[in-house]
Image (spheres, coloured by chain):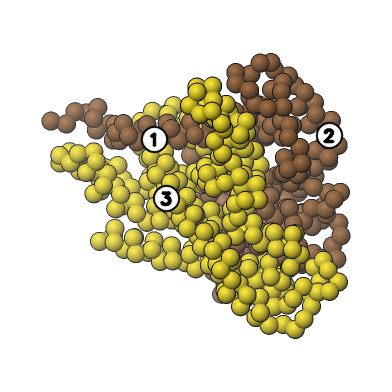
Amino acid sequence: MLKRTDLERPYGAVIFAVAWAGCLFLLVPIACIVLFSFSDTVYFRWPPAAFSLRWYANFFASEQFMRAAMNSLIIAVVVTSASLLIGLPAALGLVRGRFPGRNLIASLLLSPLIVPGVVTGMAFLVLFANLRVEFGLARLLVGLFIFALPFAVRALVANLIGLDTRIEEAARNLGASPWRSFFHVTLPQLKPGLLAGATFVFVEAIDNFSIAVFLVDTQTTTLPVEAYFYIRDFDDPTVAAMAAILIAFSALLVFAVERMIGFEKFLRMQ
Amino acid sequence: MTQDRYRCGFCLLLPACAAIVVLFAAYGWFFWASLFRPGAEGGLALGGAPGLHNYVRILSSPEELAILGDTLWVSLELTAVTLVIGLPMALAIARSHSKLFRGFILFSLAVTFLSGGVTRAYAWLIMLGNRGLINSWLQQLGLTSSPIQMVHNWTGVSIALVHFLLPFLVFTLVGAIKNVPVSVEEAARNLGASRMRTFLLITLPLLSSGIVVAAALTYSLALSAFLFPMLLGGGRVRMVANYIYERIFVSYDLPFAAATSVVFLAVAVSVIASFSALERLARRASAR
């Protein structure tokens, strides 16, 4: 005879144990790097002898890191707003429009998701060199915008496909103008897609390495590229301080997403 | 009504089409560059007459083919390992009755996912390095007298890559598992099937196409790995992306790097295409 509690626990101890082990595997390095960022010494010591904030001081005092952080922030903000502004009409056109070549445009638009980042990065390098775009920030903005746009479009398309168009039709039948029904009926329903798209694009724009490394110049770098150079040339936990700040930031982001749309809904926009 | 509002659907896509034009101008130019030789002026200059010599050189060079083969094979192994860890995590998220447990797994995945590539690669460098956490523990416990080499080889690169791939795989799988109705599993259990039997004979076949989709995504991400082999491999581990990078920044041979990229891209795209063929096959099999 099967007991009720047995049915409610559909998976056994193995699944449970592996899932826990997976979480540990994910979190231990994250915890380790946060701990390391407060270390008093250049090398990792366990248990830590003393704590200090010197690597944070080092990070904030570094002109290169501060300039790179500023660039990354500018890139992330500009790329995120541009991707939403251009991605929203594009997603509407792809889902609601009826014209030939729709599928072709969709796959061309989403192609940077499949092409390895290094290939896209080098292609942009060649293009910008031939067009003589000397200004590093301009190269980064254009390159990362084109790379990140598909993330916004994908989230918004997923959101739009799930909408019931009869609600908009009802609004139109009741006399609302097309614009009014768009802003008062459609747009509010697109909140999860907009938020998910913005998050993906923002994270990609801040975190991208494989494309950005081809577009930086000696004056203009981004945070991940600068961190890579630092790890290559120096051996101290300054990058750990940067990492801890980014981890704290991403934990905040997770809580914000959970509060605003709920994380499980967020995942469906992927 | 809705139809006539979007009659100009194509106009809505115009700004995005501009982005596509720039992107494909870049890809096209890059492909064009692969037909030349490095120019005498240095830098990114091109020289010689257009031809297929770079492609001939790649396909006849054992070193090139070995790197490509290694990348394809290692990515497959990494996908398998990630799947073994990720499938239980996805099952737990989709099916666990404990909101706390679900939330904890999701939180671990999301924070790892969002905290960035360099952050995670550096974290593993600190964990696995010769003076890192794991080696200092092993030495304190007296399990080893000299540090075990775990970075600057495939061990470190593989561990860090599984860590990088895991969130992508789990996030993709969760949706697929949620589409399998719990009632089917409950029916099997009520009819006396064991937990294992239910999983293997009911859940897994229904899940096969979802697993193929998640594995395809994981595999294509593993194939294009660049930062992790570069940081944890310390120049001793080369996957295709790193090899391409070296051709351009170490040997300044843009045409050859471009040709390698084209071959790599062709392989990546055909792998993804065969995965989607497999997915259709799996879906048809489970529909029957």
The secondary element bearing badge 3 is classed as: helix
Say which amino acid is labelled 2.
Ser
How busy is the neighbourhood of tag 2: few (under 14 within 10 Å), some, or many (20 plus)? few
The chain that appears yellow in the image is: B
**Residue B19: percent from left, percent from top:** 70, 64
In the image shown, does B12 or A19 lie closer to the viewer?
A19
**Residue B197: percent from left, percent from top:** 22, 43
Q: How far apart are labels 2 and 1 at the CA level?
A: 42 Å
Dot 2 or dot 1: first in sequence order is 1
Give the residue drawn at x 43%, y 62%: B275
The secondary element bearing badge 2 is classed as: loop
**Residue B183: percent from left, percent from top:** 26, 42
Q: Which mark is residue B80?
A: 3
Which shade is chain A?
A: brown
- In the orientation shown, which residue stands out farthest toward the top? A50
Protein chain holding label 3: B
Q: Are marks 3 and 1 on the same chain?
A: no
